[in-house]
Each structure stands twice: as C-alpha cells, then as structure tokens.
Amino acid sequence: MNVLHGFHYTDQAPYDCRIEWGPRGARAAAERGDIVIIVDVLSFSSTVVTALHYGALIIPYPPPMEGARSFAAAQGAELVTGRAEAAKTGGHSLSPLSFGSADRSRPFVLCSANGAACTAAGAAAQTAAVIAGSLLNASAAARAAERLRLLRPGKAVTVIACGERWDNARQEENSLRPAIEDYLGAGAILSGLSGSRSPEARLCAAAYEAVRSDVRALLLDCASGRELRLRGFEDDVAHCSSTDRYEAVPMLQGGRFVDASAPDALIGDAL
C-alpha cells in the first residue's frame, strides 16, 4: 500500500505546495481534497485563460470527442475543435489566438486529451477547488490559490503538469510523456505560492527561476513547440510563452470555468 503513519509515500505530505503529473496525479490530489491547479501550456490551459480574458464561457469536457460533440449540441454551445479541423470549418480551436472580444458571453465546450482529462480527474472526490493555470496567468493563479487557502485552512495546493502522451504506447507501457512546457508553467505558479514546498515542488520552481528569461526560446524549441511550429502555429507558441499577460483565473464552478480573479470573488464556494 506504500503507507506510513497514515500517509502514502507519494503524497508529498506534509508540504503545503506540491506538483504531480497527468490525470492520475490530478485524481490523487482530488482524493486528498487539495486545491488543484491544472497546467497544460500548449494549449488547453492557455486557451481557457485567453478565452476567459475575453469573457467567453468555457465548459471543459473529457475525451472522447464524440461525446463532447453531443454534449455541446445539448448545451447549445460551440465545440472547440482541433486546429486542423477549425482551419477547414472556420470555427474556434485549441489555438488561444482563435478567441477574441467578439466571444464575450458565448458558450464553448473544450475537449482535449490532456488538459480536459486532467480537469475531469481533478474535479472528482472532495477537491477544494480546480483552477486552470498557465504561464499567461501564473501570478494571478498563485494569488487565487493563496486566497483559497485562507478560506480553506489546512488545504494543500497541488499543481498538475498535464504532460503529453506517447503515440502507440503498448498496453504494459505508461503513455504519459512529461512535457517541459507544463513543468515550467507549474514552476512559475509554484514560485508565487507561500508555504512549505515539497522537494518536487522546490525543484520545479527552481527550474523555472533558472530559465525564466529564456522561457520563450525554450518553448519554441521544445518537442511540443517544434511540432506546433512545423504545423504553422508558431504564433500560438509565442503567445503561450508570455508570462503574466492576463489576470483571468479560470475556476471550475457548476461544470464550467468562471473567472475568480476579482478581489471580491466568492471563490470559497468553488465547487
């Protein structure tokens, strides 16, 4: 069971600030009742943050996409599609640059294999709150988490680096592929949090601090960034690499993201 004195070895207990990877890490944080921050820099979290900055209504939905289509139709919302499909249909996509001021108050359903899946896992059990964080809103997300900790004394903050997935992973293999863009985004948020940090969180924050002046170059040349650049979406990568561009803090409430950045936001009743 990997349990000692009531704690699982992998809990990073008793630290206030922690980091985990992927849907399994999000579920573990949810089961502990942590404040969960979902970080998928390229591009789920960055797209959600950008969309909320413009006042759009974002409803996350876990895979598969077929279920998301039916759900969006039932909600009277537009389904956010992949970049290639959106290029053909002219609709909104996982590109954050597909959102703008004309989208205020419009509902969208956003499905993705990593960010939306981690959001769904993080929203299970007794989670204190689920926030979407990225480089774009790193400081604002950290401040919102600090406010939540004041309202929920004793709750830890776990930042989830969503990562990517290996193609064609075998049944006996773990398909999660750690992604440095999410690690750096998590580090930027952890850098703004007070309280004790687990060794894992300390290392993540230190990694971001060590390269914070070079984040854009790193994202443009990392595996995920190169993939997007080769597909013609270099502007997306450049946008997602901007630190503290927005104040919007997407927080899950009633199945959709609402902006918890306002000083008087009632974020204590997040879920």
Image (cartoon, rainbow, N blue to C red):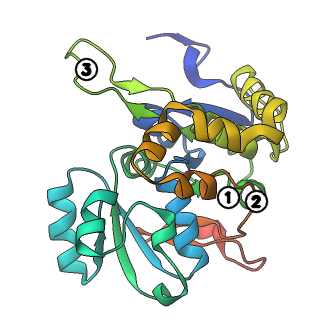
Of residues 49 and 102, which is closer to you in this image?
102
> Which numbered tag is attached to residue 136?
1
Q: Secondary structure at mark 1?
A: loop
Task: Give the residue number, with chain letter if any, for mark 3.
Answer: 169
Q: Please, what secondary structure does the residue beneath circle 2 have?
A: loop
- Residue 204 position in % (x across, y down): 72, 29
Towards the viewer: 237 or 189:
237
Above or below: residue 71 compared with residue 238: below
Identify which residue is drawn at 56% across, 32% down.
Answer: 222
In the rendered structure, which amino acid carries the disc numbered 1? Leu
Q: Which quadrant would residue 218 be assigned to in this image?
A: top right
Amino acid type indicated by mark 2: Asp
Task: Locate the N terminus by quadrant.
Answer: top left
Q: Are marks 1 and 2 in contact (CB under 8 Å)?
A: yes
As drawn, 153 above or below 96: above
In the image, what residue occupies the spot 29% across and 77% down? Answer: 78
Tell which circle, 1 or 3, labels the residue nearer the N-terminal end. 1
Q: Position of residue 238 (x, y in %)?
A: 62, 53
Q: Which mark is residue 244?
A: 2
Camera sees residue 162: no
Q: Earlier in the sequence, mark 1 or mark 2?
A: 1
Whole-percent x, y for residue 123 in the image: 44, 52
37 on left or right of 197: left
What is the spatial separation of the Cα atoms under label 1 and label 3, in whole angstroms? 31 Å
> Separation of disc 1 and disc 2 at Cα?
5 Å
**What label does residue 221 carry, if any?**
none
Snapshot quadrant of residue 5: top right
C-alpha gap between disc 3 and disc 2: 35 Å
